[in-house]
Amino acid sequence: MTLERIMAGEVTLAFRRWRRPTVRAGGTLRTALGVVAVRSVDPVAVADISEEDARRAGYENTAELRHFLSGRPDGQVFRMELGPGGADPRVALRDEVPAGEQLSELLSKLNKKDATSKRGPWTRAFLAEIAARPGVRAAELAERFGLATPVFKADVRKLKELGLTESLEVGYRLSARGRAVLDTPGEGP
């Protein structure tokens, strides 16, 4: 898999055809294997891609890379220099059980998400449902809340950003941090 090869430092370039870049130099991408550092993003003419560039991108040769790029004929080709950027900080965050001021700040963030939601409070209810039904498909969980699956998943990602949930092969589970929030008196659903 290419991601594994990027994290191992074997693949150091990627080429994509976009109308506009979806990443920027100096940015990062969080993945299941850790953080990928995006070191540069530059437009490039397909004819200027060298055999060495193709190999650094994990292709046998430029013909194979050009075939990949031909799958989407519209847009500009971009050359990205990539490398491993470390562990996903959310992984360590999941195991941190907040207390005192840290717990108060976390609860305040959840209260703000609830207060600004057009459909009303949702954070504790989502956490409780995930705790009660770990490993259940997102579509089933979304249906219980009367939401479209993409809307539900976007909200769960907000909880994941705070280290409260963890994605599984199928569904989610609560992290130790998420459990601490649910176990806080007066903070349940």
Image (cartoon, rainbow, N blue to C red):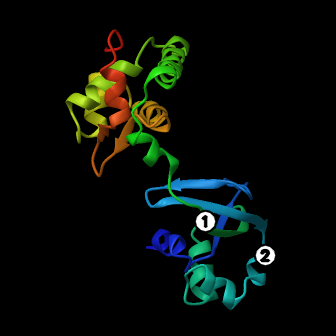
Q: Position of residue 177 (x, y in %)?
A: 38, 33
Q: Earlier in the sequence, mark 2 or mark 1?
A: 2
Mark seen at residue 107 = none
Q: Which residue is mark 2?
A: 45
Q: Nearer the viewer, residue 26 or 136?
A: 26
Q: Secondary structure at mark 1?
A: loop
Can residue 146 be seen at all in this image of the molecule? no
Assess disc 2: are there few (<14), some (14-19) or many (≥20) residues with their C-alpha within 10 Å of its C-alpha: few
Which image quarter is the N terminus in? bottom left
Q: Is residue 159 above or below residue 17?
A: above
Label 2 and label 1: CA atoms lie apart by 15 Å
Q: Quadrant of residue 67?
A: bottom right
Instruction: Identify which residue is drawn at 34% across, 17% down.
Output: 184
* Residue found at x 21% / y 33%: 133
Q: Mark 1: few, some, or many residues within 10 Å (few <14, many ≥20)?
A: few
Q: What is the three-letter code of the residue carrying label 1?
A: Arg
Query: Vertical placement of 27 versus 126: above or below?
Result: below
Q: Position of residue 107 (x, y in %)?
A: 47, 19
Q: Classify residue 120 by image quadrant.
A: top left
